Image (cartoon, grey):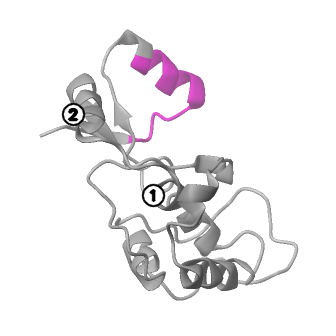
Amino acid sequence: FTFEPKSYREGSTADEVPFRVGNKTLGDFYNSLNVTRSAGSVVQVCYGGIFAASTANIFKQDMRVWKTIEKALERGDNIQEGHYMERSWGILLATPLKAFQIEAMKKHSTKVRYNPLSIHGALLREGKEADDEDKEYGDDEDVDQQQQ
């Protein structure tokens, strides 16, 4: 929850609003939503803002949460809050992972991606396939940390 984009280079905002206002980190933003479900140690995320949700999972959140999100996102087009929501939709709308699923993901990953400007916190598996993927997407600036 320490993710904190300070700026965003790709594209531009047509509405000319500042990118960053208010909440300092993803955790600060998430806490400001007053969500009743806490985030676990491993959570789903929806980079790009593309996701699907069941009506049951939508209604698990209090309507005040959705109103708070709506208000935060109507500030502008390419804003810090939008990047925080990309990382929050999965927590809010997905069926929470079960303990055996989290255990399996941790068992089969060997490191955690550290890149505060991108896909920060992704679980990775070392090996040729993972190295080839990093080269393909130009992620050579990432610092990947070994899982403890």
126, above or below 77, in the image: above
Give the x, y percent position of residue 100.
24, 33
Identity of the residue drawn at 29% across and 56% down: 40
What is the crowding at mark 2: few (fewer than 14 residues within 10 Å), some, or many (at least 20)? Answer: few
Q: Which quadrant does the C terminus fall into?
A: top left
Q: Residue at x 50, y 21 (%)?
A: 133
Say whether disc 2 or disc 1 marks the residue closer to the N-terminus. 1
| 40 sits to left or right of 7 | left
Q: How many labels does the image show?
A: 2
Image mark for residue 91: 1
Quarter of image, res 34: bottom left
Q: Residue furthest front?
A: 56
Where residue 23 sits: x, y (%)? 47, 83
Q: Which amino acid does label 1 sit on?
A: Ile
In the image, which disc is placed on residue 10? none
The secondary element bearing badge 2 is classed as: helix
Check the image and report above or below for 1 versus 31.
Answer: above
Task: Check the image and name the residue furthest to the bottom.
Answer: 22
Q: Give the range drawn in magenta.
A: 130-142
Residue sitting farthest toward the right? 14
Question: Is residue 75 left or right of 66 when viewed as pictured?
Answer: right
Magenta segment: does it hold 40? Answer: no
Label drawn at residue 103: 2
Name of the residue lying farthest toward the top: 128
Q: Can residue 139 be seen by looking at this rendering? A: yes
